[in-house]
Image (tube, rainbow, N blue to C red):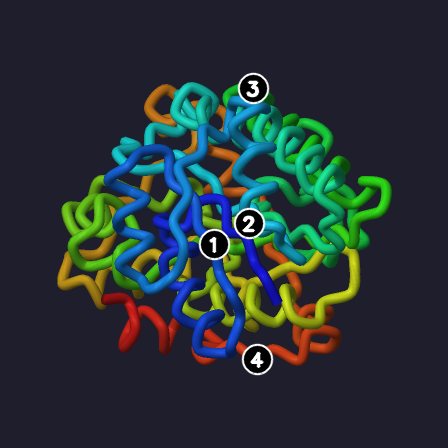
Amino acid sequence: MRIFIAGATGAVGSRLVPLLTGSGHDVFGTSRNERGRAAVDAMGVTGIVMDPLDATSVRAAVAQAKPDVVVHQLTALSGMSGNMKKWDQEFAMTNRLRTEAIDHLLAAAQASGVRRFVAQSYGGHWTNQRTGGPVKTENDPFVEEPGKEAKQSWRALKHLEDAVTTAAGIEGVVLRYGNFYGPGNALSRRGEMGELIRRRKIPVVGGGGGVWSWIHIDDAVAATVAAIERGAPGIYNVVDDDPAPVAQWLPYLAEQLGGKKPMRLPAWTAKPLIGEFGVLMMTEVRGSSNAKAKRELGWTPRYPSWREGFRTGIG
């Protein structure tokens, strides 16, 4: 197949390219500048300069590639501080890529007769409804009130998922990735989040009951290949088998990173520091089930639990 990857130099895109070419696909990858295009060319595929926020640029890029499949992997997450009180501000560009850019890509795909569209979404914790059991499926609704610091990000994800799954003439596939870890990511031994945890800058808040779902970056890429090649239209949680509360995974992760046990703070003390949204993430959020992705994509994570992944695959 001819596959167009919007965001081919990112965390997922750069790992996706070699797997797709190794399977015999003809890959086209975009970057926002000539330096990035050269990096894509160096992977042995066709690089295209594209401004994802410019409809004309997007339409021209997709028309050039004439793809069978368009893959949205556009984010702007590098250099983020992890400040939960400024969540929407830090995700402002990514939110535009999940709204404006997704609309441009879908319109370009429809104009070029693309049959399949695969898009990156999120399902690691905070988007899930916070009532009922600790683990949610794709059939459970999004949370209605994410926290005041994340309302714009919530709207952007909702827009992306609705747009992709209802686009006329398109087989729309949405992948709700869990929280990434592994080489080249913020959560790695040299990454920003890894450093914060090692330095005890991220505490266990309250009882630490917020349930998170994790996914190693290479497992996310493998699931993406499966979705491109054989996924039926719809939404899939791409997470490991082991959703777990903060009180379990954070101390274990700190140990694997060579740090001391995290501090513990009551919620009332933490709220001025990390905001309402941060407290909710640490105490009330719910994880996600990967049963549908395993069943329907024929995919199994190499790291079924963050326990093994943090120990041997964090990078």
Looking at the picture, tell me which residue is in the foreground, 277 or 222: 222
Residue drawn at 36 percent across, 46 percent down: 204
Q: Earlier in the sequence, mark 2 or mark 3?
A: 2
Distance of mark 2 from mark 4, alpha carbons? Answer: 31 Å
Distance of mark 2 from mark 1, alpha carbons? Answer: 6 Å
Residue drawn at 33 percent across, 28 percent down: 83
Q: Which residue is mark 1?
A: 28
Q: Earlier in the sequence, mark 4 or mark 3?
A: 3
Distance of mark 4 from mark 3, alpha carbons? Answer: 36 Å
**Relative to 230, 220 lies left or right:** left
Q: Is residue 276 above or below residue 44?
A: above
Q: Which residue is mark 2?
A: 65
**Relative to 127, 274 lies left or right:** left
Q: What amino acid type should be assigned to the residue bearing mark 3?
A: Lys
- The reply to whether discs 2 and 1 touch (Cβ–Cβ < 8 Å) is yes
Q: Which residue is mark 3?
A: 148
- The reply to whether discs 2 and 4 touch (Cβ–Cβ < 8 Å) is no
Q: Quadrant of the C terminus?
A: bottom left
* Mark 2 surroundings within 10 Å by alpha-carbon count, few (fewer than 14), some (14 through 19), many (20 or more): many
Res 271 seen here: no
**SS of the residue under disc 4:** loop
Distance of mark 3 from mark 1, alpha carbons? Answer: 39 Å
Q: Earlier in the sequence, mark 2 or mark 4?
A: 2
**SS of the residue under disc 3:** helix
Residue drawn at 70 percent across, 31 percent down: 159
Q: Earlier in the sequence, mark 3 or mark 1?
A: 1
Res 299 seen here: yes
Closer mark to the observer between disc 2 and disc 3: 2
- The disc at residue 300 is 4
**Residue placed farthest to the front in the image?**
64
